[in-house]
Image: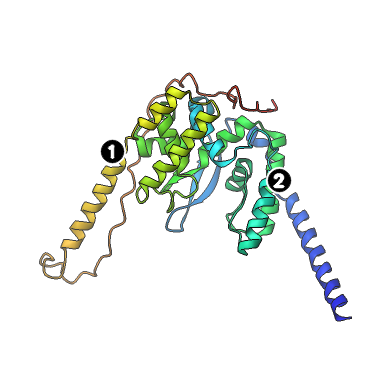
Amino acid sequence: MKWKKYLLWGAGLFALYAVYVVVSLFFLPPVSALKDKKMNMTIQVKDWQGNYHPLVVGPKNRYWAPLSQIPSEMKWAVILAEDASFYKHEGIDVKAIKEAIKYDLEKQSFARGASTITQQVAKNLFLSREKTLTRKAKELYLAKRMEQEITKGRIIELYLNVIELGPMVHGIGHGARYYFGKSPAALTPRECAFLAAMLPGPRVAYNPYKNLDKVLKRSNMILRLLANKGVLSAGEYQAALAETPNIGRMQRKVDESIKQVEVMANHTSATVPQGLDKQPEQGPVAPAAAPAEQPGGTEAAPEKAPDSGAAPKDAPAPQDKQ
């Protein structure tokens, strides 16, 4: 009879947890405010040392990039690489969730999340990064609400402006200037694919400072997806493959950091200038972050730049609500 007692206790605890989750959903912030394209909100983002910093999401952020100033290749690069069913689902990809659950059970971990772009926006704007069932439930609920309240175009605009692309580099506006010294509107298809290729792991796995070849290889895959979906013509695809991303700015940052390390390394106990030999030993200097840059004047969007989240001719048209 003990097993019945344990079963009752388990059912009771599950019921209490379910009530807790349902109640917590009522205290989540409304998403209707996201409709306003002039809206500004401040979220907390974590740097690569684990410290939190405020990030403005909205036009008051000097790197903010309206959808009309983002090339269609950039938008479709992240959609095809991160959430190919973006224009088909309503915030939640049930098939992907089932596959993720099966995979996680086999690995006995939360190794695969199956989050849609909408879920990632909900998490980045309103939730923490903890991997718990409660947070996942909140994420799913907010994603459904967002799909009901705002358009697909607005969702992708928010996503592209909060994605992490480097050390305290958030959003396509900052990423385009940090790596290529240009506005998002001026990005080439190869550069769009390069930035999209970093998204799974800009800190380690797809960090171009450490794994440039890996980033380039994945960007080739993304270019192929763009060509297969008709976003790029055959000629544009071949031209993009032949293009080598101008990473001169990145190389200069690496060279500067190496010089700094060499200078510090030369200050050994035998060469420390007189009067400084009693100072505590200093550790290696971390690579210098990119200097803050003022964005240039307003630039006209390229001919292909989307202004309402429009899909290419052979892709499913977004069902936006106005």
**Identity of the amino acid at label 2?**
Val
User: Relative to residue 233, is residue 193 depicted above or below?
Assistant: below
The quadrant of the image that shows the N terminus is bottom right
Q: Residue at x 24, y 70 (%)?
A: 280
* Image color mode: rainbow
**Residue 255 pos. (x, y %):** 24, 48
Q: Residue at x 52, y 34 (%)?
A: 225
Mark 1, residue position: 248
**Residue 172 pos. (x, y %):** 46, 36
**Residue 176 pos. (x, y %):** 40, 35
**Residue 168 pos. (x, y %):** 43, 47
Looking at the image, can residue 66 be seen?
Answer: no
Mark 2, residue position: 94
Determine whether, in the image, residue 41 is placed left or right of residue 195. Answer: right
Q: Quadrant of residue 105?
A: bottom right
Determine whether the residue tagged by mark 1 lies in a helix, strand or loop.
Answer: helix
